[in-house]
Amino acid sequence: MNHINKIEHIGIAVKDIDQANTLYEQLLGVPPYKQEIVESEAVITSFFKVGDNKIELVASTKEDGPIGKFISKKGEGIHHIAFDVDDIEQELKRLENEGFQLINKIPKKGADNKLVAFIHPKTTNGVLVELCQEIN
C-alpha cells in the first residue's frame, strides 16, 4: 500500500492575490479554477491546474496570520508541498511514529474540499509538508 499517492499541489505564498492571479494566468496560460477564503487559516487561495499538477497561491487575510508571518520573514515564494493521501489520520499516526514532528495531530478542513494537516519543516529538511485527503 502506498502511503503517499501523488503530489497534490505546490503552495506559493504571495502578498497580493489579484496581482499573483494575473501573473500566474499569464505564466501558465490558464485562469485559476477556484478561489476561496479559508477563515481558520486567515488566507485567500487560488488554484491553477496545469496538466495533472496544481499550483495554490496563498495570500494572508491578516498581517499576523501564518502566511503574513511567513512573508514578513522570508518574502514571497514557495511555501509548502502537499501530498495526496487516502487516510490522513492513519498517515499522521504513521509519520509521528517515524519521528516526524506534526504541526496538526488532528486534520482540519482546508481549501479545495480537503482535510489537511502539516508536518513541521524541522523534521523534513526545511520543507513545510502538507497532507491532503479529499472530503467525500
Image (tube, rainbow, N blue to C red):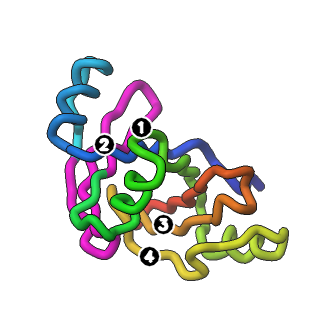
In this figure, which residue is indicated by the disc labeled 3?
116
Q: Are marks 2 and 3 in contact (CB under 8 Å)?
A: no
Q: Nearer the viewer, residue 1 or 16?
A: 16
Q: Secondary structure at mark 4?
A: strand
Q: Mark 3 is on which residue type?
A: Val
Q: Position of residue 118 (x, y in %)?
A: 56, 65
Q: Quadrant of residue 23?
A: top left
Q: Amino acid at mark 4?
A: Lys
From the viewer's perspective, tell me whether residue 58 is left or right of residue 117.
Answer: left
Check if residue 51 falls in the magenta segment: yes
Instruction: Give, as a single range, the part of the protein colored magenta.
Output: 35-58
The quadrant the C terminus occupies is bottom left
Amino acid carrying label 1: it is: Lys
The residue under the point 23% across, 39% down is: 33
The residues tagged by marks 4 and 2 sit, at their Cα atoms, a distance apart of 19 Å
Residue at screen point 76% across, 74% down: 96
What predominant SS class does the magenta segment belong to?
A: strand
User: Which of the image's four quarters has the N terminus?
Assistant: bottom right
Between marks 1 and 4, how big is the CA–CA gap? Answer: 20 Å
Comes first in the chain, label 2 or label 1: 2
* C-alpha gap between disc 4 and disc 3: 5 Å
Residue 6 is covered by the magenta coloring: no
